[in-house]
Amino acid sequence: MFIRFIKNMIITKKRYLQGFFAVVVLLALVRCVFPGVADVRREASASTAADKAVGEGGTDVKPVCAGGRGNVASGGCRDGQPACGGGGIQPSTALATFFNADGTPRKSRIYSVSSFKGVFPDSNSVQMAAARRYGVSPVNDRTEAEHRMKELVYMGSNPYYHVDKLNSSIPYLVPRAAVLLQDIGRAYFDSLQVKGIPLHKLIVTSVLRTRDDVAKLRNRNGNATENSCHLYGTTFDICYNRYKTVEDPDGPARRMVRNDTLKWVLSEVLRDFREQGRCYVKYEVKQGCFHMTVN
């Protein structure tokens, strides 16, 4: 009896084909009666693929440190987010829009700011609180600085800005400040592009200072403060009366742009970052720079 049962269970080629076509016909009828079934399945597949892309670092992942209105990306890091002060920092990944919906190049006017002193008033005492909160303990000399590299990052080479010859500081910042500087440089490039101005790099004139650097600077400049924000690796200076032209050394020369024009564009970018709470900015008249500390 068992053997007879096994023989009845054997599926012949003819029975297999009959069953296969019966299933195909049944699914076709279900599709005709309920056409929405296929749409629901496609939406579910697309949702799963999008979730997977985000989990693997796709473009939908929001950057940890970004910021911006107009020229900059939104979503700046706020207080209490440790990722902004350590190795988990990511630069802004938001893309600027260079074309209108109809494909024509997007043009933006230069507005500058109402008053440099009024828009960028943050004094040393204001910036010092942020420097002590997010910075490292002051470095005594450059030899000690070489042993503190786990707390600092090198920022002497970057496609978005140029570091001037440093006599009283060294090219290191805390990660939070390094990301801010890069985001400012990138936003400046984007702003120049949409305004139809040839690209120019910002020039950084001062970064981290050791206690020895501050003492030597005070010997030459009596107005230099002993308790400088530059001691904490959170502060840098960007000059507003010099810029580095981006051009092909073997190609044609770029058209000349007035420093005032470049300064107006820079002021718009810095105003946006400051209004987002990403930094404090002081307009320095004698030093010819924007003195800023990460927030």
Image (tube, rainbow, N blue to C red):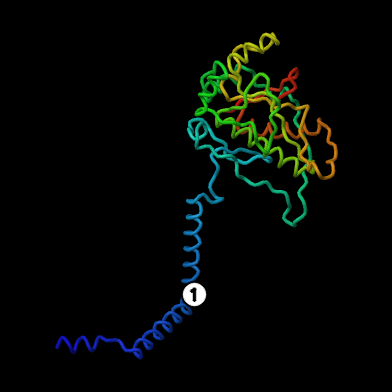
State how many labels appear.
Answer: 1
Q: Which residue is mark 1?
A: 35
Q: Position of residue 146 (x, y in %)?
A: 54, 24
| Image quarter of the C terminus | top right
Q: Nearer the viewer, residue 60 or 216?
A: 216
Q: In the structure shown, which secondary structural element does the residue marked by tag 1 occupy?
A: loop
Residue 196 visible at all: yes
* As drawn, 290 above or below 199: above
- In the orientation shown, which residue stands out farthest toward the left? 1
Q: Position of residue 55 (x, y in %)?
A: 47, 51
Residue 241, located in which quarter of the rendered image?
top right
Q: Nearer the viewer, residue 134 or 34?
A: 134
Residue 117, located in which quarter of the rendered image?
top right
At label 1, counting other C-alpha atoms closer than 10 Å, the crowd grade (few under 14, some 14-19, many 20 or more) is: few
Q: Position of residue 4 (x, y in %)?
A: 18, 89
Q: Position of residue 115 (x, y in %)?
A: 75, 25
The residue sitting at 75% across, 35% down in the picture is 265
The residue sitting at 49% across, 59% down in the picture is 49
The residue sitting at 47% across, 55% down in the picture is 52
Residue 227 located left or right of residue 120: left
Q: Nearer the viewer, residue 119 or 218?
A: 218
| Image quarter of the N terminus | bottom left
- Residue type at numbered disc 1: Pro
Residue 126 visible at all: no
Residue 34 located left or right of residue 16: right
The residue sitting at 39% across, 82% down in the picture is 23
* As drawn, 169 above or below 275: above
- In the orientation shown, which residue stands out farthest toward the bottom? 14
